[in-house]
Amino acid sequence: MAAQKPRRFPPLSGVLVLVMASTGLVVVDLTIVAIGLPLISADVVDGDSAESVVVTYMVAMGALTQAAGSLSDRWGRRSLFLAGIAVFTLASLAATLAQDLWWLNAARVVQGCGAAVIMVNGIPLISDRYTGEERNLAIGAWGSFATGAGLLAPTLGGVLIDAFGWRAVFAINLPLGAAAWALAARVLPPTSPAPTSAARPDWPGSLLLMLGLGTATLLMLRPGDTPWAGQDTIALITACLALAAFLVLQLRVPMPTLELRMFIRPAFCGAMLAVLLSRVLTIGGSVYLVLYLSDGLGLSPTSAGLLMTPIFLAQIATGMIGSKLLSHWAPGLVIGSGYLLKGIGFMALALLITPSTPWWALLGPLLAWGAGGGIAGAPVMAVAVQVTEPERVGMVAGTVATLASLGAGVGTAALGAIFTLHDSTGAGGQAVADGTRAVLTVSAVLAFIAVLTTLVLIHPHRVPRPDRSQEPAR
C-alpha cells in the first residue's frame, strides 16, 4: 500500500462549518461594536461614554461560560447549542431596536449569555466529530477562523456603520443567526447526556462563579479617573468572597462546575495562561490600535477597519501551520514561536507609531501580529484537549471561553488605564499616539512573557502525540 500523504486540512463537514460560522458570530461581536461607540454615544447615551455596551457583553459571556461548559457535558450538545443560537439571535434583535443605554445593555447581557453557550460547545462538537491529527487540524481551522473573524470585525463594522448606521452591527446577526440555527438543526446528531449527568448540577457553584467574575470584571472596567467610593469597596469584597466560596465548594461537591484538579497539570495551566494572554493582547490591543487609526491618523471607520485586515489574513494563512507543526514539533515550541512573532509585531508597531506615520508602514508589523496569533492560537486549544479526559471536554471549553472573555475584558480595562495615563501628556493626535504606543509596548512585554511560560509549562513530555491509529483509512 502506498504511503499516505499527511493532511494539511481537516476533512470538511457540516459540523465544522457550523461551529466555525457560529463562533465567528460570537467573536465578531467582541470588537465590531467598538467601531460604532461614537455614534452610539451621540444617539442613545446623550454624549456620555458608551463603553459599557462592550463591557456588558464581555462580562456576561465570561461569567456564564464555565457553567455552560459543564452543563454541555451533562445535558448533551445539540439542544444546548440550538438554545444558545436562538438566545443570541433574539438578543441581537433587541439590541437593534434599543432606544436607550439601559435597553441596549440589557440586550447585550442576554446576547453574552447566548454567546457563552455557543462558544463552549465549539471544541466539544469538534472533538466528537474528529480524532487524532484530524482533530488537531479541525481545532486549528476553527480557532484561526474565530480569531481572524474577530480581527476582521472592525472592517465589517466600519462598512456597515458608514452605510447603514450603528444598528446594522446588531441587525447583521439576524439572518446569520437564523441560518446557523437551521444548519445546526440539520447537521447536529442527537447527543446523549454524559453518564454522570444524573448527579445534581452544581447550581450554587455556577451562581457564585457568575457573581464573582461579573463583579470583579465590572470593577476592573470602572473609569480610571473616578475616585474610589464605598460602593467600589463593597463590590471588591463581594467578588473576593464569592470567588473564595466558589473554590471551596468545588473541592466538596461530587460534580463541580470546575474540576480544580485539572490545574495540577502544568501543560493545562500553560495552555490556559496562553489563552488568557492571547485575548488580552488581541482584543485589548486591537481596541486601542483602532482608536489610534481613527483619532490619531484621522481615518474613517471603513479605512480604519480595512487597515486591520492584514492581521486577519495572516491569522488565517498561518493558523493551519500551527496545528500541523504539532505533529512534528514540541507544542511549547510551536506556541512560543507564535508569541515571539506576535511580540515582535507589537514592538515594531510601538516604534513606528506617530501622528504622521504613513499607513503602509504599519503593514509589516500587522502581518507579524496576525501570523504569530495564527501559529500560537490553534495549538493551545489542541493541547488543552489532549491533556484532559474526554468526559471533561465541555468543562475545558468552558474554562477556555471564560478565560478568553475575561482576558478580553481585563485587557481592555488594564490597557485602557495605560492608554489614559500616557495620552494625558499630549494633545490631539500626539496624545492618542502616545497612549497607543504605551499600550503596544506593554503588549509586546506580555507576549515575550507568554513565550517563556509556554516553553516551561507545555513541555513535550507532558503532552501526548496525536494517536494516528484512530484516524479513518484514506
Image (cartoon, grey):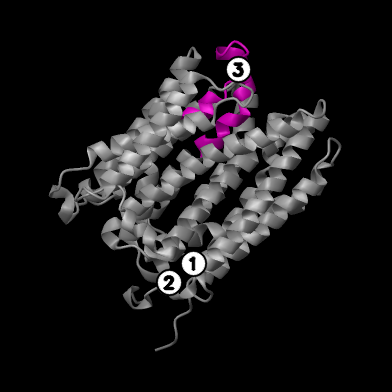
**Closer to the camera: disc 1 or disc 3?**
1
Where disc 1 sits, the SS reads: loop
Secondary structure beneath disc 3? helix
Region rendered in magenta: 28-56
Q: Quadrant of residue 93?
A: top left
Amino acid type of the residue tagged 3 in the rendering: Ser
> x and y percent of residue 293 in the render?
74, 35
Distance of label 1 from label 3 (alpha carbons): 44 Å
| Marks 1,3: beta carbons within 8 A | no
In the figure, 207 relative to 308: above or below?
above
Residue at the disc numbered 3? 41
Q: Is residue 142 above or below residue 461?
A: above
In this rendered view, identify the residue nearer to me: 302 or 336.
336
Relative vertical location of residue 433 with respect to residue 471 in this rendering, above or below: above
Helix, strand, or loop for circle 2? helix
Q: Marks 2 and 3, Cα distance to the nearest angstrom?
A: 50 Å
Q: Residue 458, which numbered label?
A: 1
Q: Which mark is residue 422?
A: none
Pointer 1 with pointer 2, Cβ within 8 A? yes
Taken as a whole, is the magenta stretch helix, strand or loop?
helix
Q: Residue furthest top?
A: 46
- Name the residue that disc number 2 marks: 462
Counting from the top left corner in percent of width and height, residue 414 is at 60, 37
Q: Is residue 135 left or right of residue 217?
A: left
Residue 140 visible: no
Left or right: 270, with 251 as reference point: right
Q: Position of residue 225 (x, y in %)?
A: 64, 23
Q: Position of residue 186 (x, y in %)?
A: 29, 46
Quadrant (top left, top right, bottom left, bottom right) of the C terminus: bottom left
